[in-house]
Image (spheres, coloured by chain):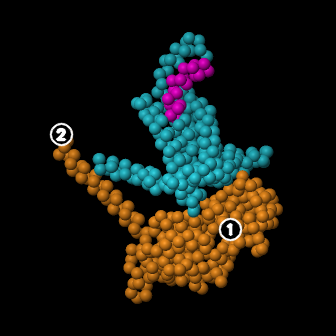
Amino acid sequence: MELHPVGRPRAAVRLGAVVVVAVALAACSSSKSSTSTTGTTGGGLSGSITVSAAASLKETFGTMKTNFEKAHPGTTINFNFGSSAALVTQITQGAPADVFASASKTTMDDLVSAGKVEGHPEVFAKNTLEIVVKPGNPLGITSLADLTKAKTVALCASDAPCGAAADKALKQDGITLPTSQVTRGADVKATLAEVTTGDADAAVVYVTDAKTVTSSEGTAVPIAASQNIITSYEIAQVKGSKNGDLDQEWIAYVTGPEGQAVLAAAGFMPPG
Amino acid sequence: MAVAAAVTVAFLAVPVFALITKASWGTLWGDLSTPEARSALRLSLVCSLWATALSIVFGVPLAWMLARSRMPARNLVRALVILPMVLPPVVGGVALLLGFGRRGLIGGWLYDLDGIQLTFSTAGAVLAETFVAMPFLVITVEAGLRSMDRRYEEAASTLGAGRWTVFRRVTVPMILPSLVAGAALTWARALGEFGATITFAGSIQGRTETLPLAVYLQLEGHQDVAVALSLLLLAVSLAVLVSLRGRWLGMSPSG
């Protein structure tokens, strides 16, 4: 109690520290979304946006980011990659994404139904499935039906676009893999890693992901078109985005000739 | 001081409160009764109990050696024991893969020997959980062994009891509170393990998809189910905490 006169200023210092920390945290979180004005003078775009995109777009969007930022100095495109289904959950729960690029129409439709899409989504690419096995294909897997030979098959989670597509492809060909043989990955990159770095014998991923695999990591086994599934990639601006101009510019870039060229080089099919 | 403490309490309480209030209580029973949820619960219980049992069987001798013997490099061994506690779980998973995977240090040899594969198996999930949870048991029991009164052991041996009898009938009853607390912490840690399990054992329904993994995968489109499973884990964690009150890490019970 004799410390009382000293105690009061101490409490004020502590309160001040708490306030400073709180302000710093708030500043941290708000700097992610754009803080600059839209439609600046001189035709220059600026600011930064967060693009939540399907994991399979990692490489292509990375390339596009480098080219885009070079063409539009002062802009920053930040990425949040993951399974489209998980990204929709994040956005509907309030995650600050400005643009959403999905690997399926279904997941984009989910975001539209949640009222989180500004305008209309645009299809910008299509993809199809491929099997990746251990280097040299030791089990001799040549088709989806041969997957029953594998001890462990990696598929994406059923709600992820690649998982839904894989399940659909297997079902329509009448192939049933016992659940004890199937390990589910959260997104297509995690699923691919089960074969390239893990002990899974085969994984069903996209053609574009299979293309990134080196010969020492794995071997790609194509799936006949008659047995395969085609998935459509869609892109849209998220409602509540603070830099609509930059969002639209990025969307235009992805759907325009430069973006399309990058996607085609990676093995994506055109949207048309 | 009080203001900072209040902010901290709020920080810790808000997520827990949100989990409870935002759950879909109407569909809770249905969400927890699906085949996936039931298999995840069964697997979680089986794997965590096995991990706890293995931690006791292998951890108590190690705790004894650390507490009682003049083992060389004792500090090094203790550091190794504590390592899984501070290592990020997913890093633990990667390390386990490199050590016990099909192409791993020991795992490769096991595979060539008899086709034994630990990855993507329930045994693999138990291995991953034991790796991260055993340190809790070793540390707690070692503390108990160090702090117990050794005169009773000495009295027992002067009365003619052999070493194993002394251990079984004098030491163990005396360190029982530490052993129980250690086992409870170990079990809770094993139950909640995610990073090492998903990296080493994958997520196979009915085989390796424990509750935390099920929550992670269900978040993609079945948020209600994910929240229901999370509530279940929260309830279990609270039960462990309540049962441990005051007995944390060898402290004498207050309740």
> Residue at coordinates 37% horizontally, 51% vertically from top-left?
B10
Q: Nearer the viewer, residue A152 or B223?
A: B223
Mark 1: few, some, or many residues within 10 Å (few <14, many ≥20)? many
Magenta segment range? B164-182
Q: Nearer the viewer, residue B163 or B68?
A: B163
Give x and y (percent) for residue A25.
38, 61
Q: Main secondary structure of the magenta part?
A: helix
Disc 2 target residue = A2
Mark 2: few, some, or many residues within 10 Å (few <14, many ≥20)? few
Which chain is painted in orange?
A
Give x and y (percent) for residue A146.
80, 62
Is B56 left or right of B106, judged from the image as shown?
A: left
Quadrant of the rendering where the C terminus of chain B is positioned: top left
Tell me the colour chain B is drawn in: cyan
Q: Chain of mark 1?
A: A
Residue B167 lies within the magenta run: yes
Is A136 left or right of B228, judged from the image as shown?
A: right
Q: Which mark is residue A165?
A: 1
> Residue at coordinates 49% horizontally, 55% vertically from top-left?
B23
Residue A84 lies within the magenta run: no
* Residue type pointed to by label 1: Ala
Figure check: A229 above or below B222? below
Residue A170 appears in the picture as rendered: yes
* Residue type pointed to by label 2: Glu
Give x and y (percent) for residue B102.
72, 51
Is B142 left or right of A211, judged from the image as shown?
A: left
Residue B105 appears in the picture as rendered: no
Label pair 1/2, CB-CB below 8 angstroms:
no
Helix, strand or loop at label 1? It is: helix
Give x and y (percent) for residue B244.
47, 35
